[in-house]
Structures are given as C-alpha cells and as structure tokens.
Amino acid sequence: MNLSSLGFFRSLRKDNHQFAVVGLGRFGRAVCATLHKLGYEVLGTDVDEKRVSDALTDQIVGHALQLDSTEPAALKEAGIFEFDTVIVAIGNYIQESIITTLNMKEGGVPHVVAKASSEVHQKLLLRVGADHVVFPEFEAGCSLARSLTKPSILERFDLDPDHSIVELIVPDEFHGKTISELQLRNRYGLNLLAVSHDGKFQINPYPTQRLERGSAIVVIGCNKDINRLPI
C-alpha cells in the first residue's frame, strides 16, 4: 500500500462494522477470517455451495449465502447493495470479477475493493469503478524478491515508488555504536524512527542508545539510500 491508496482509506467510515466478501477461495477466506476475528460482522458469498458450507462450518463468517454475483437481482435480494464496503475476492475468473464489480458500483455500494490476477485485470477493474484494487500475487512476488536479495529487511512499507519505511536487522557494522555515532542522516540520508529493545520497539530513541547485534531498527528515507546500508 502507498500514498495512492490514501484517498480511498480516508473515505472509509470509521463506524462501519459490516463487510461483505464475494468469493470464498483462499484470498476471500483469509479476508473473512481476519475481519471476523477482529469482531466485525461478515457476510460471505460464493457460487459454490461447498465453499459456503465450509465457511460456516469453519466459523470464519457470521453469515454465508450461495449466489451468483453476476446477477444484480440476486445481489439486491441478498442485501449486498446495502453494505458500505464489499470485497470482490474473485481472482481467477476475470469476467465474473469484472461483472460483479460493475454490479456493486451500479447497485450503489460506496466502497468496492477488488482482487486482480493480472495487470490487465487490474486496469479493467478500475475502469468499471472499483475503488481499490489489490494484486496479491504481484505484491507477494515483490516481497519475496526483496526478501531473497535483502534478507536483513524484515518489513517494508512503500510510501511511494521512491520512499519507504523499513524494519531491518541491525547490521554488524552498527553493533555497539550509539545512534549519534552512526550519523544515519548525514551518512545515508535516513531518519531512525525506532529501535527494538526487550521484544518491544522504543519510538524516537535517545541519541546515546547503543545498537545491539540481533535487534532491529526502523528507518525512513529514499529507497536508494536504504539500499546503501550495510545489509
């Protein structure tokens, strides 16, 4: 997620406690299970009766219905158009995904999140009105490639194509040195946000704090500067 998503997430209602998820494959189930665990009311739908039954049996949703999401009448009868946020988790069936997304927007759903399986699919979803598109395979691939080439970077949050916040293991070269001695801003153009200590992060650590091998730090800055770190 980056700044291009900011407008969408700012528009979400903070008091919304109901979500509908269309498509109960692996991605849809993960969304349902997480929302349900967080205490939100979740309605799951799928054209496959077994997937609907499994979702209810596994208790990852509050309610589940079998329906064809390409049929506007079925969606209206099920009350899907009354939800503030609907996640279209149909990835492998592009036509059904696009038609479902279009149905949601034409039915008046304010916030529609759709899963894409390719860049072309992503463009088509945006064209028919999806408010936010996720591309899990692409994002997972990028994350894996980064992990393989930069194993010291534990987490990365992309602010935009050129800037990120990253959590990384303290490099051996930094072991035993204070934050002041490292001069991260002068040497690398980076700002240190937090340092791990006893399993927790200390935000805005003191300049006199020494870094230890095996702990982690969080920095913010330009990607090309982050890549210059001895990791």
Image (spheres, rainbow, N blue to C red):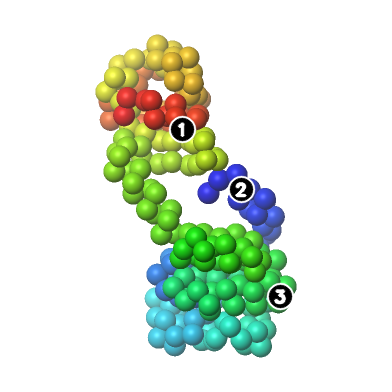
Give the residue at mark 3: 106
Q: Secondary structure at mark 3?
A: helix
Nearer-N-terminus badge (2/3): 2
Give the residue at mark 1: 223
Expressed as whole percent of the image width and height from the top left, the position of residue 205 reads: 47, 22
Quarter of the image with the C terminus in it:
top left
Q: Residue furthest front?
A: 120
The amino acid on which the numbered mark 1 sits, given as a three-letter code, is Asn
Expressed as whole percent of the image width and height from the top left, the position of residue 194 reads: 46, 29
Q: Residue at left 40%, top 15%? A: 182
Question: Is the C-beta separation of discs 1 and 3 under 8 Å?
Answer: no
Q: Residue at left 44%, top 29%? A: 224
Q: Quadrant of residue 104?
A: bottom right
Q: Residue at left 48%, top 14%? A: 186
Label 3 neighbourhood size at 10 Å, few (<14), some (14-19), many (20+)? some
Give the residue at mark 2: 4
Q: Residue at left 53%, top 77%? A: 95
The amino acid on which the numbered mark 3 sits, given as a three-letter code, is Glu
